[in-house]
Image: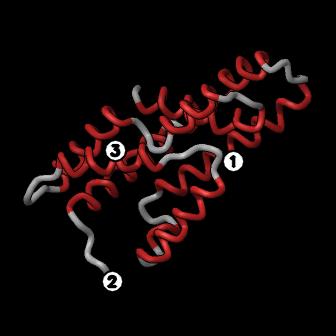
Amino acid sequence: MVPVSRTGLLLQAYYEALYERLTGRRDALTNRIRQGLARELAVHRLESEKQDAYLEACLAFVEERLEAYNPIGIQYLFDRLRSDEAIALEQQLDWFDSRAEFAALREAARAKVEDGMSDARLRELADELIRERGAFPDRSIIAAYKEAPSLNKVPDYIVALAIEEEIQC
């Protein structure tokens, strides 16, 4: 088993803090998604009967995101090599490129780490990262959607917007 670096430890605390915030505010997040989805689908002039399918997709993406942030989620069951392979595959499948955003998040975490961080301090630093960097990979999703909006990107986009609004509360 590979030891976790201080930066890696802070990133794990960041993901755990996101998980806690979002699971604790699931109803509010769902309401934000419903409202944002209605606005965005009106722009695309989508028939109302098809809107339920988009809402289901959004809610599935929330579950996927929560699993990615879950501190005891499946991503912690694999060794680092397999994790790197999973990241490479995800980057091939996603319609947005989040590599630069992740590099910036990792660099921001690296700049914040301290020797002998207590659990309380680790949590404070994770909260700072969330305030400063938002929830990964929301910035990439939002930017890519704004650059080339399309219906197939709407669920990811709406979830990213709703998460960003909710974590700043």
| Element type at mark 1 | helix
Q: Which residue is mark 2?
A: 1
- Residue 163 position in % (x across, y down): 51, 34
In the rendered structure, which amino acid carries the disc numbered 3? Ala
- Residue 120 position in % (x across, y down): 18, 49
Q: Quadrant of residue 167?
A: top left
C-alpha separation, residue under disc 1 versus residue under disc 3: 27 Å
Q: Are marks 2 and 1 in contact (CB under 8 Å)?
A: no
C-alpha separation, residue under disc 2 versus residue under disc 1: 32 Å
Earlier-in-chain disc, 2 versus 3: 2
* 14 vs 110, nearest the viewer: 110
* 162 vs 79, nearest the viewer: 79
- Say few, some or many: other residues with alpha carbon within 10 Å of mark 3 (under 14 / 14 to 19 / 20 or more): few
Which residue is rendered at x = 54% and y = 57% of the image? Answer: 67
Q: Quadrant of the C terminus?
A: top left
- Say few, some or many: other residues with alpha carbon within 10 Å of mark 1 (under 14 / 14 to 19 / 20 or more): some
In front: label 2 or label 1: 2
- Say few, some or many: other residues with alpha carbon within 10 Å of mark 2 (under 14 / 14 to 19 / 20 or more): few
Q: Which residue is mark 3?
A: 104
Which residue is rendered at x = 67% and y = 29% of the image? Answer: 148
In the rendered structure, which amino acid carries the disc numbered 2? Met
- Residue 112 position in % (x across, y down): 18, 46
In the rendered structure, which amino acid carries the disc numbered 1? Ala
User: What label does residue 60 carry, if any?
Assistant: 1
Earlier-in-chain disc, 2 versus 1: 2
In front: label 2 or label 3: 3
- Residue 162 position in % (x across, y down): 56, 30
Q: Is residue 65 above or below residue 128?
A: below
Q: Quadrant of residue 126?
A: top left
Which residue is rendered at x = 61% and y = 53% of the image? Answer: 64
In front: label 1 or label 3: 3
